[in-house]
Amino acid sequence: MPHPPRHIPRISPFILFLIRDAFMMILTVGLSAAIRLNEKWIKTENARKDAERSRTETELKNLRNQLNPHFLLNTLNNIYALIAFDRDKAQDAVQELGRLLRYVLYDNQNDMVPLNREMDFIRRTAG
């Protein structure tokens, strides 16, 4: 014997519109929140990278500041010892040290120096 048809309750159109609108609102708010979180994450990531870059540059400058006095002290000690053996070579060494310090202190103050400029300095001091 066949089953009698079941009565399916009908949902009013007003409730369907409410459900649809609520779903669209939730979807819109969720998408907006995701976009804002993404933007905030990008800003935070860029700030972290800038802080890391700044920290690295500071460490490098600090290392340079530590190496320069050490290099200068060693060079002066070597020139002092050279005076006892060959005064002419000692005078040449003092001149070369002066050129090097002038280059480091005045001619090389930018963060980036063109490679050809560095090569010219090396050629002049080596030749």
Image (spheres, helix red, strand yellow):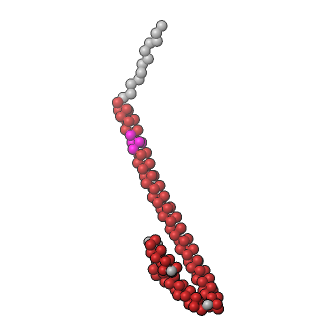
Give coordinates of residue 113: x percent, y percent.
Answer: 45, 73
Q: In this picture, is 25 found above or below 40?
A: above
* Near-viewer residue (27 or 74): 74
Instruction: Confirm whether residue 121 shows in the render.
Output: yes
* Residue at x 50%, y 68% (from the top left corner): 54
Residues in magenta, as a range: 24-28
Give coordinates of residue 57: x percent, y percent.
Answer: 52, 70
SS majority, magenta: helix
Q: In this picture, is 66 found above or below 15?
A: below
Give coordinates of residue 79: x percent, y percent.
Answer: 61, 87
* Near-viewer residue (89 or 56): 89
Report if residue 30 lies within the magenta region. Answer: no
Report if residue 25 lies within the magenta region. Answer: yes
| Quarter where residue 14 is shown | top left
Q: In this picture, is 118 found above or below 50?
A: below
* Near-viewer residue (67 or 34): 67
> How many callouts does the rendering have?
0
Q: Which residue of the protein is positioned furthest toward the front in this rendering?
A: 127
* Residue at x 46%, y 12% (from the top left corner): 3
* Near-viewer residue (126 or 9): 126
Instruction: Confirm whether residue 94 shows in the render.
Output: no
* Residue at x 58%, y 83% (from the top left corner): 72
Give coordinates of residue 68: x percent, y percent.
Answer: 56, 79
* Residue at x 58%, y 88% (from the top left corner): 89
